Image: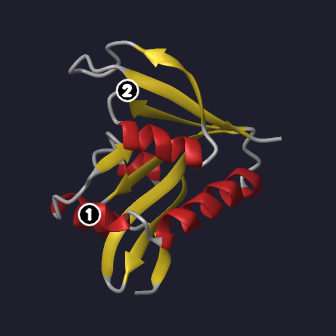
Amino acid sequence: MKISLERLQPAHLLEIHNSGAIEGQLGADQVYDNWQLYKNGDAFVGKSGSKIIAAAGVMDMWPGVGEGWAMLTPDAAGLSVVRKFKEMFDLILIANNYHRIQATVRADFVKGIRFAQWLGFESEGLMKKFDQDQNDFIRMAKIGR
C-alpha cells in the first residue's frame, strides 16, 4: 500500500492515541496534552491508505533548537514511512535553521533507541529517574552542520 505524509492536525493525535496501537514513542510523552506547544513546529502523520500508522515532528524550543518526537504503531515497522520520516527530520533541520534537534527516549525502549540512532540521533547520556514514574531516559540529539 502507498504511504503518504500529511501535516499533523489535532484529530490525528486523537486517532492514533485512541487506536491503542502505539508500539512506542520517541520523546512524545506529552504530545496529547500539549497540542498548543507541538503545533509550534513541523509535524506530520504517515498514512497507509486512510489509516494513520505513525506521527512525528519537531517542536520549536528556542532559536536553533527543536525537540523531536515520534509515535509509531506496529504497522509502521518495515514500511517506507520510517524512510520518509528520516527525510522529514533532515529537511526540518535545514528548513528551520536548527543546529540541534534533541529527543528523550526511555532507556528500556530498545527499538526507540535504535530508531533514533537510525534517524541520525546520538546518545548524550542517561537521565536517571527522569519522569514522574522514575523511569530512566536517554537524551539523544541530531546535530546540524
Q: Secondary structure at mark 1?
A: helix
The image shows residue 68 at horizontal and vertical percentages of 52, 44
Q: Which residue is mark 2?
A: 107
For this orientation, the residue located farthest to the front is 78
> Mark 1 and mark 2 in contact (Cβ < 8 Å)?
no
User: Which of disc 1 and disc 2 is earlier in sequence?
Assistant: 1
Residue 97 in view of the camera: yes
Separation of residues labelled 2 and 1 (CA atoms): 23 Å
**Three-letter code, disc 2:** Ala
Q: Which residue is mark 1?
A: 16
The image shows residue 67 at horizontal and vertical percentages of 54, 40
**Three-letter code, disc 1:** Ile
Query: Which mark is on residue 48?
Result: none
The image shows residue 39 at horizontal and vertical percentages of 47, 55
Q: Looking at the image, how many numbered discs can be counted on the residues?
A: 2
Q: Nearer the viewer, residue 126 or 15?
A: 126
The residue shown at (28%, 61%) is 74
Residue 40 in view of the camera: no
Q: Please, is residue 73 above or below residue 141 in the view?
A: below
Q: For residue 30, what is the image quadrant? A: top left
For this orientation, the residue located farthest to the top is 128
